[in-house]
Amino acid sequence: MPHLYILISYKLYMYSFIYIQFVCIRIEIIIKSIIFRMLKPEFLLIWFSLLIIGPEIRFSRADIGTASQYIPPYLPTACYGNDVSQFPTSNLFAAAGEGLWDNGAACGRQYLVRCISGSLPQACLVPGETIQVRIVDRAQTSVSRPSRDGTSLVLSNTAFQTIANPAVPYLNIDFQQL
């Protein structure tokens, strides 16, 4: 009787082994057929195009929004009150709109800001130029009112004029937190 169990176990093992071999061979055939299809001329053209154009494709982690400007007086700010040392020496700073304010957590954050377009032709001074700004205030409560309400960022006068024509009331921007 024990020999019968061993014989049955051995046969089950052999059948499962054969089945696994069959599945592996089937998978190998499928993979080879996929690779063979991809080597056809039309696919080779696609692969070659991606190889050539690939480095030119840029994936951005930036957000799209709007920016306006505000002018002095900048003090007191919602982040640091009357502390003058809060402002970068470059005067490239901003007030956070409600979408970025995050109950005050935005204070001190740094953003890269790039002008995309504006409400007037040739709004961006140097297309593609990026500036780095520091959040020092909340746009909704700033002492000086922005040139347009509801924007993502309200740039200091210096920051705005670095990337855009000062006559433009607002900009379309992309911005990325550092």
Image (tube, grey):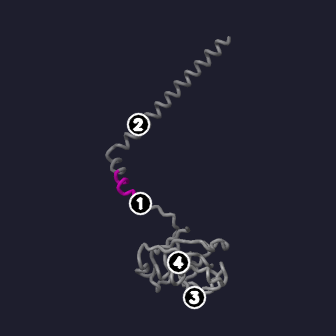
Disc assigned to residue 57 = 1
Question: Seen from this angle, which residue lies furthest left?
Answer: 41
Q: CA distance from mark 3 to mark 1?
A: 41 Å
Between disc 3 and disc 2, whose residue precedes?
A: 2
Kind of residue indicated by mark 2 = Lys
Q: Are marks 1 and 4 in contact (CB under 8 Å)?
A: no
Q: Secondary structure at mark 3?
A: loop
Q: Is residue 53 magenta?
A: yes
Between disc 2 and disc 4, whose residue precedes?
A: 2
Q: Label 4 neighbourhood size at 10 Å, few (<14), some (14-19), many (20+)? A: many
Q: Which residue is mark 2?
A: 32
On the picture, is 139 further left or further right than 113?
Answer: right
Disc assigned to residue 72 = 3
| Residue depth check, mark 3 versus mark 1: number of the one nearer the observer | 3
Q: Which residue is mark 4?
A: 67
Q: Nearer the viewer, residue 6 or 163?
A: 163
